[in-house]
Each structure stands twice: as structure tokens, then as C-alpha cells.
Amino acid sequence: MKEGPKQLRVLGHPAHAPLTHFPLALWTAGFLGNLLYAWRPDLFWWHFAFWNTALGLALGSLTLGTGFYDYAFIPGEKTQVQETAIRHMMAMLTAACCFGAALYFNRGEGPADSTQKILALSCSGLGALLLHCGGWLGGQLVYHFGVGREPE
């Protein structure tokens, strides 16, 4: 891509790319918290999963917002860039929904029963898988197609 799209920038730097690190790290930590709670049922891990997932959703909403803005400026229709961007967006939106469900199941002082624990782990696990697949697609957009980079 030769000409850089008009993306949201802060002090000359793209806003979306650096914001992605926060939900990626927090949601991954939320999944690991649920995994550790399943392995060793210490309430610390239950609360750890809840708060990491909640903070990931809060910061993820900013990240999703900047991503939607940047998506609006990807030129063309039905190009490989556009299709990759749509796949990236769908993976990340679905991951966010999975983590929203995980947050719902992680509520309370601890799981009411084993079903709640399994659902929290399953939702965060699926969310983590989608998150990392979507992150790879986002990397393809930046490093392979040059989306968001300044023209050389």
C-alpha cells in the first residue's frame, strides 16, 4: 500500500496499534486466571480472572473504537486488505463477546457451582484463541499490507 490512509493518530503516531497491547495482555491474563483457578481453586485466581477480563473489556472498547475508525479509511472494496481487515474485525469482536460472557460467569465471590467455573474457563479460552488469531490478522494488515504505516 503506497499511500497511507487517514488513520486516527496521536502526536503523529497511530492510535490503534499501541492500544491493542492492553486488551491482549489483560484478556490473556484473565484466561490464565481461569485456568489456574480450575487447576488450583484459590479465590485469588477467580478474582484475578474477573478484574483482568473487566479491565480488558474497558480498554478493549477504546481499541475497538479506534479500529473501527481506521477501518473506515481502508481504500477499496473486495481487496485482500479489505477481506483481511474484515476477518480481523470479526475475530476481535467475537473475542470481546466471549470475554464479556466470561466476565458474566466470573462474577461473585466465587463460582456457585462447577458449571459456572467451566463456563468461565470455556468462554475465556475461546476468547483467547480468537484474540490471538485476530491479532495475527492485525499483524498481517500492518506488516504485510502496510496499513497504518507512513509511506516510505
Image (cartoon, rainbow, N blue to C red):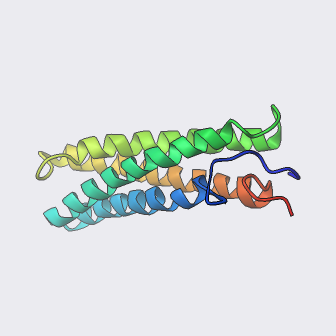
Q: Using the rendered view, name the quadrant where residue 11 is placed.
A: bottom right
Using the image, determine if residue 29 lies above or below residue 118: below
Measuring from the top left, give residue 16's x and y in whole percent. 58, 53
Measuring from the top left, give residue 135's x and y in whole percent. 59, 55
Drawn side of residue 111 relative to residue 74, left or right: left
- Residue situated furthest top in the rendering: 77
Residue beneath the point at 52% across and 44% down: 64
Number of labelled discs?
A: 0
Residue beneath the point at 15% across and 49% down: 111
Using the image, determine if residue 50 lies above or below residue 83: below
- Residue situated furthest front in the rendering: 11
Placement of the C terminus among the 4 image quadrants: bottom right
In the image, 107 versus 69, the foreground residue is: 69
Drawn side of residue 22 relative to residue 150, left or right: left
Measuring from the top left, give residue 98's x and y in whole percent. 40, 42
Q: Using the rendered view, name the quadrant where residue 15 is placed.
A: bottom right
Measuring from the top left, give residue 93's x and y in whole percent. 51, 40
Residue beneath the point at 78% across and 44% down: 81
Residue 92 shows up from this direction: no
In the image, 98 versus 67, the foreground residue is: 67
In the image, 152 versus 51, the foreground residue is: 152
Residue 151 shows up from this direction: yes
Using the image, determine if residue 77 lies above or below residue 32: above
